[in-house]
Amino acid sequence: MQLDRKTAMTTKIKHHLTDDLLMAYSAGTLPEAFNLVVATHISLCDECRARMGSFDAVGGELVAHLEAVQMAEDSLTAIMAKIQAEAGVSEDEPLAAPAVGSGLFPTPLRDYVSGDLEDVRWRKVGGGVSQAILKTSKDATVRLLKIPAGTAVPDHGHRGTELTLVLQGAFVDEHDRFGAGDIEVANEDLHHTPVAEAGVDCICLSATDAPLRFNGLLPRLAQRFVRI
Amino acid sequence: MLTTTTPTATPDKAVLAANAAFMRPEDRSVKAKTVTTDETSKRLAWVTHVVAVRDNKDTAAFAELFAYFGPRVKSFLMKSGASPDLAEECAQDVMVTLWRKAHMFDPAKASVSTWIFTIARNRRIDLLRKQRRVEPEDLPWGPEAEPRQDEVMVLQQESEILGQAIAALPDKQRMLIEKAYYGELTHSEIAAQTGLPLGTIKSRIRLALDRLRHAIG
């Protein structure tokens, strides 16, 4: 089931991660919220997984060619002692939660939700749209969004960077169409009105490093309450 | 890819023999026919050392890995803003992780230096940023039981070419790539530190990546 989902998805993905994001993910400098979206997309996308491998390799080469600094005199002894001390302890590799239920969410997202789609605690935010904010460090926020088929998300601009990964269904805006597995990278220049396609509800994972800016008074008032 | 490598030395017989230990029998002939450079031999030796740690808990092989990578991981962490004491402790942890997770290393997917970089990076995120980092889900078909030796070989050679390409970048481009990886800096923070406008930083990094792609493609 899982294998089918991914094999099907990875061949259909049209919108990928940018070099900027992949390099920052590889360097480990992204906010936690962005990390989650990037890791979830890579779980679904072989092309971005391969590109991530190249960026990791750049990091590896940089480390391999660094000038050596002096290690403490007893460093290796200390390391061997730590290894000895841990030898009796059983491997604490966290076992990946088995894919149960809908099996829609890749592992990184399942870890944050502690389950799959049916375990998400949705809150209505108006216009038929529901969201669930996931707990991460404060430098950026990430939420799951459920947009009923055929519904528009209010026209909004962006102050920072916004990543939106489609997990189910699709949305279209003035510029393009985003289906399952596609990721949209939006910056402050983009003003758009995404509309969920007819068919199934559109489920997205969306991260921003600044609050979205809605055009229009009512959404702006609502924004204070829903933290979009 | 193979044709772009200039052979400068004959294969190190000891390395080849040691490498035979983790090859599938049908692949051994492949290795014998491939010409290696000193640099590639060194990289293959690291692979052999990790395999020896994995299979035999070989402390001598581990000491070799420590001698090369310990001081460089410490240097990497210091460049990321850790104090020498913290970097020492953290580099020790990275080496302990290398020992404990040796079974996770797949030499057909990553070079030893790439693998160690990812361990060091993750440790740095835990320690300096105190954030959680999730990794992508493993591929559904999982790792092969034993990597094909020719794939391992090609990967080491590609890594070597990438290393040379990074070294050959113009200073300004290389410095920005280094800052992005070591410096725990966003592009805006690099802009503040170097006085370069954000657009210039992004275009230099893009140029550098284009050059690297061209060099290894």
Image (cartoon, coloured by chain):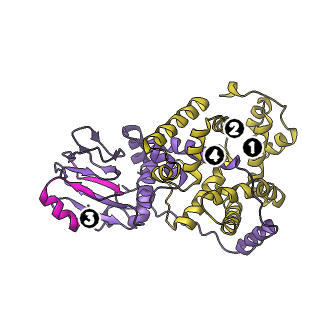
Chain colours: A purple, B yellow
Residue identified by numbered label 1: B43
Q: Nearer the viewer, mark 3 or mark 2?
A: 3
Q: Which structural element holds mark 2? A: helix
Residue where numbered disc 4 is placed: B110
Taking the image as shown, residue B15 lies to the left or right of residue A225, namely right
Label 3 Cα neighbours within 10 Å, binned few <14 / some 14-19 / many ≥20:
few
Quarter of the image that includes the C terminus of chain A: bottom left
| Percent coordinates x, y for residue A219 in the rendering | 16, 59
Give the residue type that dot 1 points to: Arg
Q: Which residue has dot 2 on it? A: B160
**What residue is rendered at 56% in x and 42% in y?**
A54
Inspect the image, locate mark 2, and give the three-letter code of the amino acid beneath it: Glu
Residue interval drawn in magenta: A199-228
Q: Which residue is mark 3?
A: A227
Query: Can the viewer see residue A99?
Result: no
Please tell me which of labels 1 and 4 falls first in the chain.
Answer: 1
Q: Residue furthest right?
A: B13
